[in-house]
Amino acid sequence: MIRPMSESHLRQQVSHLTKLLDVSRAIGATIELQPLLKSIERAALEVLDCERATVFLYDRAGEELYSKVATGGQEIRFSAKRGIAGEAARTGRIVNVPDAYADARFNPDIDKTTGFRTRNVLAFAMTGYEGEVVGVLQVLNKQGGPFTADDETLASALSSLTGVALQRQMLLEQYAEKQRMQRDLFIACDIQQSLLPKQAPQVEGFDIAGWNRPADETGGDFYDFVELPDGRLGLLIADATGHGIGPALIVSECRAILRALASTTDDLETVIARANDLLFRDLDGGRFVTMFFGVLTPSASRIDYVSGGHGPLLLYRHQDGARLKLNATTMPLGIIPQIDAAPADPVVLESGDVFILVTDGFFEWANAEDEQFGVDRLFDLIHEHRSRSAADLISLLHEAVADFGRDTGQADDLTAIVVKRL
C-alpha cells in the first residue's frame, strides 16, 4: 500500500521542482563559462540547503580536478584519483558522507588552512551528452543534519541539468579560443607574406624569381632580394628549425638583421659573422637558422656568397649539362658564437646557366614509400625545362614535388630562388 505524501512533504517537493526550473532558466540564459559556474554554485547552495559548494572541472588529459568556483575559497587542483570528489569523478556515482572526519577519503588539511569545519559532504559527477564526466559538484554542511536520500535525488537532477550545460559552454569557449587563435595566425601569415618581395628584381642579363609556401599558416623559411650599390643584388634565403609561429618569428628577426647589416657593409664575412652573433644571443638551445647570403654582380656575371649550413646549393651548366652541388661554407647560425665565416669561391654564370637555391622541404619531401624527392629529380627537371623562365622553373618544381608526395602532403616549408643567366 502506497502511503499518501504529507502536505509538508508535497510543498517541499514542489519547492524543489520550482528551484530546479529556476536553475534551468538561469543556466540557459548564461553565455559565458564563469557566470555559468557561479550559477551552478548558487543553485547548489539553494536547492540543497547547504553552506558551501565547489564546482570542479575535470581535466581528462591530466586526470585532475580543478575548481573555478568555490564558496569562500580559492582555486585548487588535485588528482582525480584522490578524495571524495575524485571518487565521484571516477565512478560517476553520488558520494554521500554524513561524517567527514570519520571518512578516510576526506582531507582535513583544507579545513586547517581555511578555518572552516566540514561536517558532511555530498559529491556528484556532472555528466555531458553521452554520459562522460565533465566535472564534479561538491557541497558541504547540510543545514540541520546530514544529506538525505531526497538530497541525492535532487543532486541527480541537478547533475543532469548542469553537466550538459557545462559541457556546451566549455565547447563554445574552446571553439571561440580556437577561432581567436586562427584569426591571429591569419594576421601573422599576412604580415609575414607582406615581408616577402612584391615582385622579381629586374637585372639586365638575368632572369630571377623567388617563391615561398609555408606548411602552416606561418613558416620558418623566407627569401629576400636586397638592392645594393653599383647595381648589385643581394640574394637571401633562410630556414629556421621547424615551422609555424616560433620559426616565423626567428626568420623575421633574421631578415631584419641581415637587411640592416647589408646596408652598412658589403663584406660577406662580416655580415654573416655579426648575424650569427646576434642570433646566438637570442636563440635558445636546439634552435638555429641555415642561411645563404649572396651578392650578384651583373657586370661580372658573378655571385659571391657565404652559406651558414644551407645546402646543397645547386648549379646547372647549360653548355655541357653539368650538375654541381656546392656545399655550405660554414655552420648554421645561432649555435655558437664567433663562427669561421670565410666566403666561398664565387660562382660565375655563363649564358643559360641556372643557379638554384631551395630549402630542404623540396628534396626531403617523401612519398608514401618514404622515398625522398631528392636532388637528382630536381636537376632532371631543370635540365628538361632549361629553356623556361626562372618563375616557370619554380612553378614546375613545385608541381613535380607536390605530385611526387601527393599521398603524404606538404610537411615542411618550401622556398626557392632561381637565378638564370640569359
Image (tube, rainbow, N blue to C red):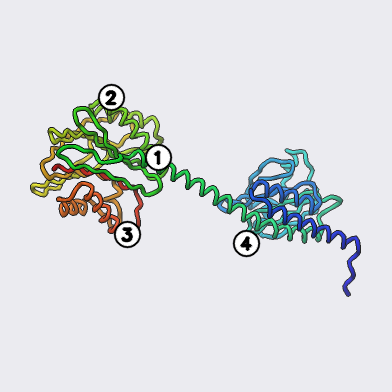
* Residue 96 visible in this rendered orientation of the protein: yes
Q: Circle 4 sits on which residue?
A: 129
Q: Give the mark toward the camera: 1 or 2.
A: 1
How far is the residue under mark 4 from the one under mark 2?
64 Å
Q: Give the mark toward the camera: 4 or 2.
A: 2
Q: Amino acid at mark 2?
A: Thr
Which is more N-terminal, label 3 or label 2? 2
Numbered disc 2: secondary structure: loop
Residue 406's disc is 3
Few, some or many residues within 10 Å of mark 1 (<14, 14–19, 20+): few
How far is the residue under mark 1 from the one under mark 4?
41 Å
Residue 191's disc is 1
Q: Position of residue 402 (x, y in %)?
A: 30, 56
Residue 264's disc is 2
How far is the residue under mark 4 from the one under mark 3?
39 Å
How far is the residue under mark 1 from the one under mark 2?
26 Å
How far is the residue under mark 2 from the one under mark 3?
45 Å
How far is the residue under mark 3 from the one under mark 1?
29 Å
Q: Who is closer to the viewer here, 175 or 113?
A: 175
